[in-house]
Image (cartoon, grey):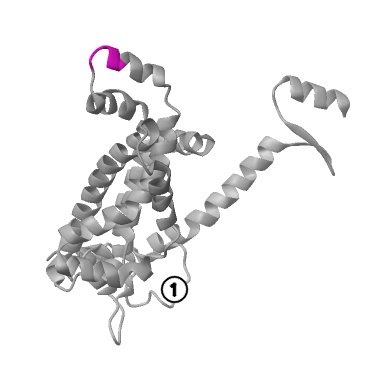
């Protein structure tokens, strides 16, 4: 036992005594990781399977793999209930929210990380305190505010609402990342005559791509999936977003289950694509942000 343990330790493998001898922790972690991945993916895979089931017998079907797969659910989901229009409304709101949030939060986080000004700490902790307030409690004040600004029932007003909701966390995360960038780099830039905006755009932001990827994914998902505020602020069908459009498949007496599952799969695709494209920066950004 001791010889095996020593050889494993020399090879860089973490070992630990078990009931049946030496247990390799890396294999155990791999098995646990695979099981957790299956548990996480099971609902998504089952939804994907149901989206290809014929709508007539979808509730009574227990087959994981469709016996008679059909793509008519996707055609019906995209063509009926103005689903395609809702999809592009959500895409516009989500992308605009990400761009505006990241731009404003970068400026604010840079100021909090690098400059001294009166009431700096109270203002920063005020942003943090806003994270503890449930979003549903703010619906009535937000509704009244958008009404007075004449932005009610508007995608622009909804976008600004999402920007305000996502700014506190984004500022908090980016501030911690910016503080970890050595000041010597910034001082070298300023010696060459660079101003604040150039330092931020040419130095700080390129070095902070992992952090920007993290906050972009969180902001995109938060605005893409948001339902209560969109349902409250929008009352014209032409301006509805995707979560409201999904609710149209549920009627008072019947529910189009096949198109509903197909529409749900379509609604999941953008979030998966965004995550896959930025996965490399996402992993490094989460680890570095947590350390800092």
Tell me the chief SS of the magenta region: helix
Residue at the outermost bottom position: 253
Residue at the outermost front position: 118
| 249 part of magenta stretch | no
* Residue 167 in sight from this viewpoint: yes
Name the residue: 38% across, 44% down: 119
Mark 1 burial class by Cα count in 10 Å: few <14, some 14-19, many 20+: few
Image position, residue 43 (x, y; %): 46, 61
- Total count of labels: 1
Image position, residue 165 (x, y; %): 32, 56
Name the residue: 33% across, 13% down: 188
Q: Which residues are magenta?
A: 189-193
Name the residue: 15% across, 71% down: 237
Image position, residue 124 (x, y; %): 40, 46
3 with respect to 267 (left or right): right
* Residue 246 in sight from this viewpoint: no
Image position, residue 243 (x, y; %): 28, 66
156 with respect to 66 (left or right): left
Element under disc 1: loop
Which residue lies under the disc numbered 1?
A: 61
Would you identify the image quadrant in which residue 79 lies?
A: bottom left
200 with respect to 33 (left or right): left
Name the residue: 76% across, 25% down: 8
């Amino acid at each position: 036992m001791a010889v095996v343990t020593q050889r494993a330790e020399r090879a860089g493998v973490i070992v630990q005594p078990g009931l049946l001898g030496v247990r390799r922790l890396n294999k155990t972690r791999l098995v646990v990781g695979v099981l957790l991945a299956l548990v996480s993916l099971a609902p998504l895979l089952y939804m994907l399977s149901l989206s290809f089931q014929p709508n007539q017998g979808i509730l009574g079907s227990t087959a994981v793999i469709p016996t008679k797969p059909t793509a008519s659910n996707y055609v019906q989901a995209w063509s009926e209930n103005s689903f395609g229009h809702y999809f592009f409304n959500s895409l516009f709101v989500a992308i605009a929210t990400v761009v505006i949030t990241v731009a404003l939060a970068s400026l604010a986080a840079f100021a909090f990380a690098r400059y001294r000004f009166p009431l700096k700490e109270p203002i920063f902790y005020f942003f943090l305190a806003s994270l503890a307030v449930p979003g549903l409690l703010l619906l009535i004040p937000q509704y009244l505010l958008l009404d007075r600004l004449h932005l009610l029932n508007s995608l622009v007003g909804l976008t600004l609402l999402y920007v305000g909701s996502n700014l506190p966390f984004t500022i908090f995360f980016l501030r911690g990342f910016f503080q970890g960038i050595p000041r010597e780099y910034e001082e070298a830039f300023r010696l060459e005559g660079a101003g604040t905006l150039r330092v931020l755009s040419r130095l700080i932001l390129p070095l902070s791509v992992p952090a920007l990827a993290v906050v972009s994914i969180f902001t995109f998902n938060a605005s893409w999936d948001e339902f209560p505020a969109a349902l409250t602020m929008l009352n014209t069908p032409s301006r509805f977003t995707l979560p409201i459009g999904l609710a149209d498949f549920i009627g008072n007496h019947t529910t189009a289950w096949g198109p509903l599952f197909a529409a749900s799969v379509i609604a999941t695709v953008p979030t998966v694509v965004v995550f896959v494209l930025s996965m490399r920066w996402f992993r490094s950004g989460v680890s570095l942000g947590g350390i800092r």
